[in-house]
Image (cartoon, grey):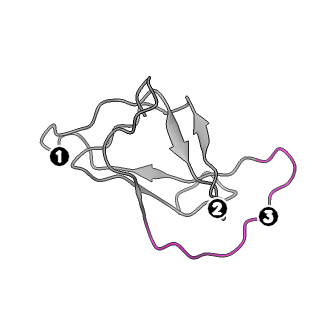
Amino acid sequence: MDADGKQIGKAATHAGGTSGGSVTLKPGQPLHAQVKTPNKGVADGNCDAKPTKIKVYPPNNTATLTSTETAGIRACANSLSVTKVSASASPS
């Protein structure tokens, strides 16, 4: 999302399918998912603007969470995907 809250580019797709097992967290334990896009060089420089916020839908929810922690992500080649959530920060 840009600074005015408008969506930049297309919404992310699900990488590796949408079904998975339950994830049980302890109080205060973070939940992780990876957001993936091709590198700028692979996309011939065709990348969306850097967002100031990112909006996510937690599993089994219709309400969104918004974060200003975007880690500098940019969608390139009109391709953005997100993995299943995990209690671990390692790749899924």
> Which is more N-terminal, label 1 or label 3?
3
Total marks placed: 3
> In this image, 92 relative to 4: left or right?
right
Which amino acid does the dot numbered 3 rest on?
A: Thr
Q: Contact, CB < 8 Å: mark 3 with mark 2?
A: no
Residue wearing tag 2: 59
Which amino acid does the dot numbered 2 rest on?
A: Pro
- Residue 38 higher or lower than 67, as above or below: below
Q: Quadrant of the N terminus?
A: top left
Q: Is residue 25 magenta?
A: yes
Mark 1, mark 2: which one is toward the viewer? Answer: 2
SS at circle 3: loop
SS at circle 1: loop
Residue range of the region highlighted in magenta in the rendering: 15-29
Q: What separation in Å lies between label 1 and label 2 (alpha carbons)? A: 30 Å
Residue wearing tag 1: 43
Numbered circle sitting on residue 24: 3
Q: Which residue is at 18% across, 47% downward?
A: 42
Q: Position of residue 67 (x, y in %)?
A: 58, 34
Numbered circle sitting on residue 34: none
Q: Position of residue 39 (x, y in %)?
A: 26, 44
Q: Quadrant of residue 45?
A: top left
Q: Position of residue 22 (x, y in %)?
A: 72, 71
- Residue 81 higher or lower than 40, as above or below: below
Q: Position of residue 84 (x, y in %)?
A: 55, 64
> In this image, 77 relative to 29: left or right?
left
Count neighbours of disc 3 (C-alpha within 10 A) and say few if under 14, some if 14 to 19, many if 20 or more: few
Count neighbours of disc 2 (C-alpha within 10 A) and say few if under 14, some if 14 to 19, many if 20 or more: few
Q: Contact, CB < 8 Å: mark 3 with mark 1?
A: no
Q: What separation in Å lies between label 3 and label 1 (alpha carbons)? A: 37 Å
